[in-house]
Image (cartoon, rainbow, N blue to C red):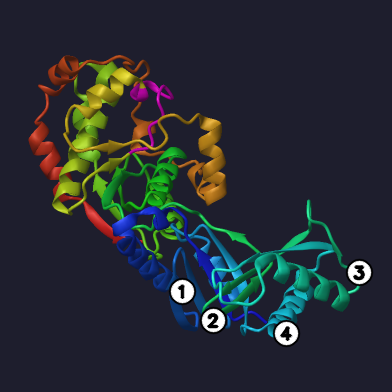
Amino acid sequence: MYHLLLVRYGEISLKGRNRKMFEDILLGNIRTALQGILVHDIHKTFGRLYIETDHWQQAAERLQRVFGIVSLSPVLKAELHTEAIKAAAVKVMADASAKTFKVETRRPNKAFPLTSPELSRTLGAHVLQSLPGLSVDVHKPDVILNVEVRQEGAFLYSRTIPGLGGLPVGASGKGFLLLSGGIDSPVAGFLALKRGVAVEGLHFHSYPFTTERSKEKVIELGRILGQYTGRGQFPLWICHFTEIQKAIQGVPFPSLRITIMRRFMLRIAAQLAQSHKAYALITGESLGQVASQTMESIFTINAVTNMPVYRPLIGLDKEEIVEIARRIGTYETSILPYEDCCTVFVPRNPATRPTVDQALEAESYLDVEGLVAEAIAKTEYLDV
């Protein structure tokens, strides 16, 4: 019955002179998401898009994972005369499987002869007469029959399918996500995608201290995040971190080893990001969660770069992070028992309040620039 899918976007409509840029990016992401589905036409009006397709359910399922979309509705279009709208109203309500309903009408087309309240009353009476067993409940109806009377026709719908909201991916530039195999960093990547960042992952792999299974685990996390990129793909960089890990184990300040390791990671990430025109790093840090995420640790680790470091989880507790991980589908993969280099090399008593001077003293035992250059040279790219 439905051959038209209404796509609503919220925040984009508030962007003023830049709105067209956001709309165009969203439209491109929608076209990519719908590849393989027969789409007859996509056209836009203020604050919404209409997609003409014979496969609205399949299209809606894909578009629920496209950032920038607030909600979707399968819509029946009727000609601009009362009898055609009444017939469409009966079809929509017959499909709704409800016991109670009410009608809400919006009439941007003021040339239509009936006012919004008049049309609502007319349609409500006709539906009641045509579909025995239905009754009106204006306070808590099972279904709201929505009617929009526009210049190009009348649009009727009763279902509203929630979307992810946010901004279309690509509207806010590119960022590099430090992607471990844990619970937190994939959630951080998801939240950065929600704000329109085109996220590329960077994973530090320390074979043979970490196994190939730990690498495959991260690749799988990339596949899951790829469902939300607007392209169905997730760019992933694998940095071979073994030599740096070995060198850090020789530093005579064991409590600082996790701090030094994280500083190396930021140095490598910043250089890779700059060389690929990314302007921010993204991490899964939550303030106070572990020793490397105290305020002093974050300050000391962050001191190696001037590049902005986004921490979307900074104010969330573990339960909140886990809830998002379950919702987006990364949790079950994240808890697989294949450790990454961050967990394998944690010292018994890590420093919780390291200073920059202490870190510099520990790093004086290392060829920092040489180790960073070697790790970058061994970094491989995967298009997941």
Q: What distance separates the C-alpha of mark 1 from that of mark 4?
A: 34 Å
Q: Which mark is residue 208?
A: none
Q: Looking at the picture, which amino acid does disc 3 mark?
A: Gly
Q: Secondary structure at mark 4?
A: helix
The residue positioned 44% from the left and 38% from the top of the image is 184
Mark 1 vs 4: CB contact within 8 A = no
Q: Which residues are magenta?
A: 283-293
Discs 2/1, front: 2
Mark 3 vs 2: CB contact within 8 A = no
Q: What distance separates the C-alpha of mark 3 from that of mark 4?
A: 22 Å
Residue 33: where, in percent of width, then height? Answer: 44, 70
Q: Which mark is residue 83?
A: 4
Mark 2 vs 1: CB contact within 8 A = yes
Label 2: which residue?
A: 53
Label 3: which residue?
A: 133
In the displayed structure, 251 sits above or below 186; it is: above
Nearer to the camera, 89 or 68: 89
Q: What distance separates the C-alpha of mark 1 from that of mark 3?
A: 39 Å
The residue positioned 29% from the left and 21% from the top of the image is 297
Q: Is residue 178 magenta?
A: no
Residue 154: where, in percent of width, then height? Answer: 61, 77
Discs 3/4, front: 4
Q: Secondary structure at mark 1?
A: loop
Q: Quadrant of residue 4?
A: bottom right
Q: Secondary structure at mark 2?
A: strand
Q: Which mark is residue 34?
A: 1
The residue positioned 74% from the left and 82% from the top of the image is 87
